[in-house]
Image (cartoon, grey):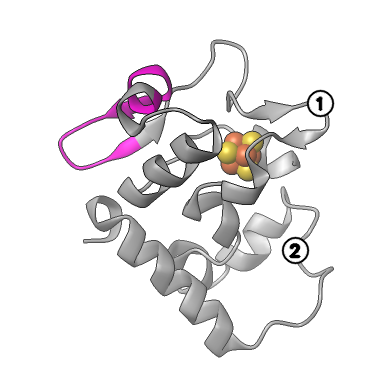
Amino acid sequence: MKCCNVDGYVYISEEDVTRIAAFLKMTPEDFEQKYVYRTAHLLRLRKPRNAQCLFLKEDGCSIHTVNPVQCRTFPFWPEIIEKAGEWEKTGLTCPGIGKGPLIQIGEAMERASEMKTAYPGIYG
Ligand code: SF4
């Protein structure tokens, strides 16, 4: 939950739009109109004025079961696991890093590759 408050954007994939819209019982079009900012190559959640994410509530993520790939795969992002020193650096703001069960490098790479597939506009 602390990671949801770090300054930045929540990028979403086309599949995220469909899944989250269905969860919220909205059409993808209505969901996009209300919650998504789309550029030529990227989609991201609109950001409220005084917070980082509209879906972050007091008891956590209100769309947890369908949250975006970016949220689900954190901290196994390509830029964190492929660049020396980034894992340790991210650990300074993420209290979960280094605390959970041991993850094999193959699984970490698999999750990172899910990011690359979901966000070609970022990793293309
Ligand atoms: S969608 Fe959920 S997990 Fe992702 S940043 Fe927002 S509150 Fe956090």
Rendered image quadrant of residue 17: top left
Q: Is residue 83 visible?
A: no
- Ligand 1 image position (quadrant): top right
Dot 1 amino acid type? Glu
Please report the bounds of the magenta region as a residue range.
Answer: 31-43
State the residue at coordinates (52%, 72%).
81
Q: Is residue 86 visible?
A: yes
Disc 2: which residue: 97
Are there few (<14), some (14-19), or many (20+) residues within 10 Å of tag 2?
Answer: some
Given residues 64 and 122, the one toward you in this image is 64
Looking at the rendered structure, which numbered label has been put on residue 80? none
Q: Position of residue 54 (x, y in %)?
A: 58, 23
State the residue at coordinates (57%, 48%).
66
Given residues 7 and 59, the one toward you in this image is 59
Q: Position of residue 76 (x, y in %)?
A: 56, 67
Considering the numbered disc 2 on the image, is that residue within a helix, a strand or a loop? loop
Rendered image quadrant of residue 105: bottom right
Image quadrant containing the C terminus: bottom left
- Please tell me whether residue 33 is drawn above or below residue 65 in the rendered image: above
Describe residue 95's horizontal placement relative to residue 55 as left or right.
right
How far apart are the two marked residues, 2 and 1, measured between alpha carbons? 22 Å
Looking at the rendered structure, which numbered label has been put on residue 58? 1
Describe residue 14's horizontal placement relative to residue 11 as left or right.
left
| Mark closest to the chain's N terminus, 2 or 1 | 1
103 in the magenta segment: no
Dot 2 amino acid type? Ile
State the residue at coordinates (46%, 70%).
112
